[in-house]
Image (tube, helix red, strand yellow):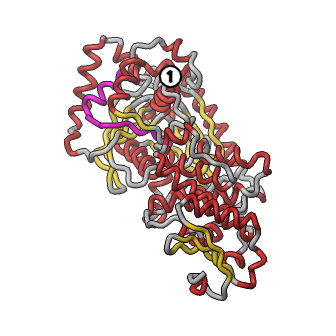
Amino acid sequence: MTRGRPASFEQGAGPDRAVIDIGSNTVRLVIYAGPTRAPRVWFNERDSAKLGRDLALTGKMADKAMDSALRALARYATIIEDFAIADVQTVATAAVRDSSNGEEFLAQVRALGLAPRLLAGDEEARASAFGVIGAFPGARGTVADLGGGSLELVTIGDGDCHDGVSLPFGTLRLPALRARGARSFDKEVSAAIGRVGWEAADPGPMYMVGGTWRALAVLAMRDGKYPLSDPHGFVLTRAEAEALAGRVERMDPERLAALPGISATRAGALPDAAALLRLMLGELQRDSLVFSSWGLREGLLFQRLDHELRRQDPLIAAVAHFTETRGGAPALAAIIAAWTADAVPGNDPAAERLRFAAILLALAMGHIEPNLRARQAYDWAMEKRWVGLDAAGRARIAATLLAAGGKQPIDRPELARLADAGALREAVTWGMAFRLCKRLGSGSRVSLITSRLIRSDRVLRLWLHPSRAQLLSEQVKGDLKQLAEWIGLKPVVAVSETPEGALGA
């Protein structure tokens, strides 16, 4: 029975699409909400069925594993029905693809009312690649998606991918390969990767997709006392990655499992994955690693978008969706961005997108209880998962929000580690200019069109139309003075009929 969608979901605030990923290690349901360009995870559940556990020995999926997977899938089908989600993609990957009883299993999945699609190896690689392309606009390099049954490698560049392959080096298969001895393992893996012919691969980093890779990133972040908690977008140089792989390859899984943030399941796979990574670094010759939380599931969604939607900025799409019901309307943010533009001269598109995102979040910050405001807004910048945003960008947005709240963030060591001093100083300027704008008329449309910030001749002028002269307070003058001195200008207030008339003040 299909139930009606709850009324609260009619406005697009709730779940409207889902992906069921029948993998070699886990069977997972992810339900999404939010903008199509930057979907928000609404529900995420997995079952460690380990469909591929016995594949290397028997060539088939074990009955116990299939029973576990089918129980989970029956639960997922019911959840999807209860929320009347019509847009559902169900895909099966390496374990089902390579097993002799794969079609038998898929028939049982269909009996649950699902419509599974068996992905070929190159299709799986392409889906993972498009997940990275969606998360990192302009990405160029090699995607390495490590699952339970296989390792997908594919090159990306110019918004597309090519040369995708699927290799039988998933985390469930690596133990048997390593049990043959280090020399045999190294020879087999290196030969398989070498046969792919990566000489034509696009230059750039290696984008790491999969939970086991992210667990490696968590280890590196922990060891380096990295100031962020989300491994998405975390970067390791090749030298750092080689040192990490060499160390983890020799570690006891029990010791790894005792470390914060590492599950027992991931700990058991990490030494084998580290050994694989060591060989990949040698064969693929990439200068850095970038870890991605987006992969196959997000890639399946991204592949269905038209060209214009793909071109949207995922950061702006996500932040605008997040703030719109919290007082951060994009139209108001655009007006404030224009009003404050003279305080931040320059036409750097990369900086402007960060400034616009920061303005959206600063508007939303104003609707948080004052005693929670600074901490919560800071966490939005530093802890919330945003795609299309690197660590330096996070630090700049955090600095903007702190300055918008009247705090001085320039000496915060965690921000200084992520972004250079000049970039942080500019972000403080963004925040101080926003604070002045909001102080003047609380962001009302009338106050914004009857005032202007004008930079000229080493002076920063605040122009006000006579009809709004009463908005000028000591606090407004103080904010103007603080901003002008911060950027090395003299503050001047001018009340006149036109902005042009203010230039003589």
Residue 57 showing in the rendered view: no
Write the start and end of the magenta stretch as one range.
275-293
For label 1, count other residues whose C-alpha is less than 10 Å away and answer few (under 14), some (14-19) or many (20+). Answer: some
Q: What is the quadrant of the C terminus in the image? A: bottom right
- Quarter of the image holding residue 94? top left
State whether residue 127 is above or below residue 487: above
Q: Is residue 396 above or below residue 256?
A: below
Q: Is residue 364 visible?
A: yes
Q: Position of residue 418 (x, y in %)?
A: 49, 41
Image height of 250 relative to 339, above or below: above
* Residue drawn where x is 71% and y is 76% of the image: 447
On screen, residue 291 versus residue 254, left or right, reads left
Q: Amino acid at mark 1?
A: Ala
The picture places residue 68, in percent across and down from the top left corner, at: 60, 27
Give the structural element (helix, strand or loop) at label 1. loop
**Relative to 57, is 23 on the left or the right?**
right
**Closer-to-camera residue (296/212):** 212
Query: Which residue is at a point 60% across and 47% down the rendered structure image?
Result: 381
Provide the residue designation for mark 1. Answer: 62
Q: Position of residue 90 (x, y in %)?
A: 53, 45
Q: How many marks?
A: 1
- 51 vs 47, left or right, is left
Q: Is residue 160 magenta?
A: no
Residue drawn at x 70%, y 55% as measured from the top left:
365
Q: Which of 387 and 129 lies nearest the eye of the viewer?
A: 387
